[in-house]
Image (cartoon, grey):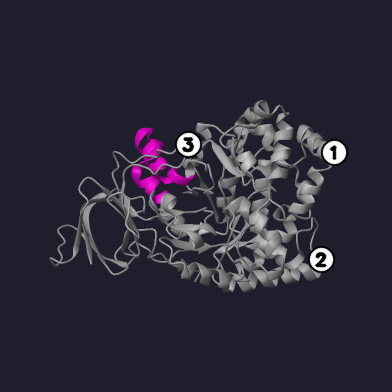
Amino acid sequence: MTLIKNALVVDGSGDVPFAADILLEGDSIARIGPGLSVASDARVIDASGLAAAPGFIDAHGHNDLRVLETPEVLPKLMQGITTEVIGQDGISMAPLPLDRIGEWRAYLSEFNGTSESLPLDYVDTAGYLDRLEAARPSANYCYLLPHGNVRLEAMGLENRAPTASELKAMRNIVRREMEAGCFGLSTGLIYAPCSYAATDELAALCEEVAAFDGMLMIHQRSEADAILDSMREVLEIGRRSGVRLHFSHFKVCGKKNAPKLDAMFELLDRAREEGLDVSLDQYPYVAGSTSLGVALPPWAHDGGVEELARRLSSKAERARMAADIERGIPGWDNFIDFAGFDGIFLTSAVTDANKRFLGKSMDEIAALTGKEPLDVVLDLVLEERNRAGMVDFYGTEDAVVRIMGRPEMCVSSDAVLDEMPHPRAYGAFPRVLGKYARDEKALPLEAAVRKMSGKTAEVLRLERRGLLREGFYADLVLFDPNTVADTATYVDPKRFPSGIRWVLVNGEAAVAEGRYAGGRSGAVLKRK
């Protein structure tokens, strides 16, 4: 039994905060109210000067593999995250047929890091979730079914439409994995093999997801020049399939595309008026982070990593890539165009020879090596076998704030914990509380907390989570609203935030007085 005394309760609903005590019994909240008392042997936490909020829910995480190796995942826990949604962007851990493990490891490294020693012999989602549960994580985890894995099992990595029999096989896989407890389907339409799918394929698979009241969490086909057409495609998938829609890391890339934000919001407004169920998440930064390989045209990835390496070793194929990057391809997000060689920085490398370039821009690496910046990009992707990561600066603060104000918005980190991660890996949630809610007053504290907890729980259909309510699970964060802040920077990203004092997961302390307390009481959550 634990009693939290004298807290400012920010309950996750968006309602005005109020002063109260909170009594926890086992894994649940027993009572909330003034003047509560307990037996002398119970734990009492004095929360004077602290806000008590529901545990934060990261709507978009990438710790699918890392949690099996380091179940505490401190960068997330120390910023108050008690639940993380993994299986993102269509590339993840399961399903994974035994005969595909070797070629899939390279794909996983782009999103989830590498571990050659960790056996990936669980075959399907049920097996992976059993493995995750056995790891005894410190936080709760929700899993999305990755579209790329479905394609891999049914038809490999080829750049083509599925045959009728392959589409039927994919639909069967979706049903099988949704029955295992997936919350929906994820896809990343800038990543092979997901990018090879047409709208018809996605709508067909989403019909199966909708039958389970699941969601489509989608990295849409364009977040730059073609973003309006891209959004229309996503909304059409929702109309045709009946699936609930969720835009991953919603943004607009490239300053030249910033004026499109009003039209993007109009599409969201019309979708809501039409009755479509649409939500989105956002990380609170003007830079993103992903695989450096996405800077290459989609056709370069056809057939997998070995085919990509062969093309990068061909003078003629490299010239073709360079021409496509220079001219652009309709509908393709050209990272070099909207971020520039001076706005793309190397964040992860496997080879010792390239680790010296971590934290440097493509322009800076070019100056150090005497190469052209484009050759730097192509050589890094080749030498790292498509395992190089990058941070790319694409946006404006005005767009961040305006998206943050949307009613559909939830907070996410979209963090990959590589050698030099994006600072969102350590600071996304405290950044919203400190920079945007307290300092810039872009939204009230109670609205910020709702977007980190209650709103996300609604989107995921999580039972008894996301709010501080009697009978709900005891996932809580106690933080100082006057000092909470992100301290991680692009130059020094591995820094825990300030002001997060306690984090409790299912009633057990995972963080106590600002330090990891050893709690391993997380749960694997499954769609009901």
Q: Which residues are magenta?
A: 425-451
Amino acid bearing label 2? Thr
State how far apart marks 3 and 2 are (Cα). 44 Å
**2 or 1: mark nearer the eye:** 1
**Vertical order, 389 against 511 (above or below):** above
In 3D space, how far apart are the residues under numbered discs 3 and 1 (Cα atoms)?
44 Å
Label 3 vs 1, first from the N-terminus: 1
Residue identified by numbered label 3: 401
Residue at mark 2:
163
Q: Is residue 391 above or below residue 153?
A: above
Q: Nearer the viewer, mark 3 or mark 1?
A: 1
**Please, is residue 319 above or below residue 466 in the view?**
above
Q: Residue at x 79, y 39 (%)?
A: 321
Disc with the residue nearer the chain's start (2 vs 1): 2
* Label 3 environment density (alpha carbons within 10 Å; few <14, some 14–19, many ≥20): some
- Image quadrant assignment for residue 212: bottom right
Rendering quarter of residue 199: bottom right
- 353, 467: nearer the viewer: 353
Please tell me whether the stretch drawn in magenta is mainly helix, strand or loop: helix
Disc 2 crowd, CA 10 A, few/some/many (<14, 14-19, 20+)? few
Residue 517 x %, y %: 32, 57
The numbered dot on residue 78 is: none
Q: CA distance from mark 2 to mark 1?
A: 34 Å
The kind of residue on which mark 1 rests is: Lys
Which residue matches tag 1? 315
Q: Depth-wise, is mark 3 or mark 2 nearer the camera?
A: 2
Q: Residue at x 43, y 43 (%)?
A: 427
Q: Secondary structure at mark 3?
A: helix
The amino acid type found where label 3 is placed reads Val
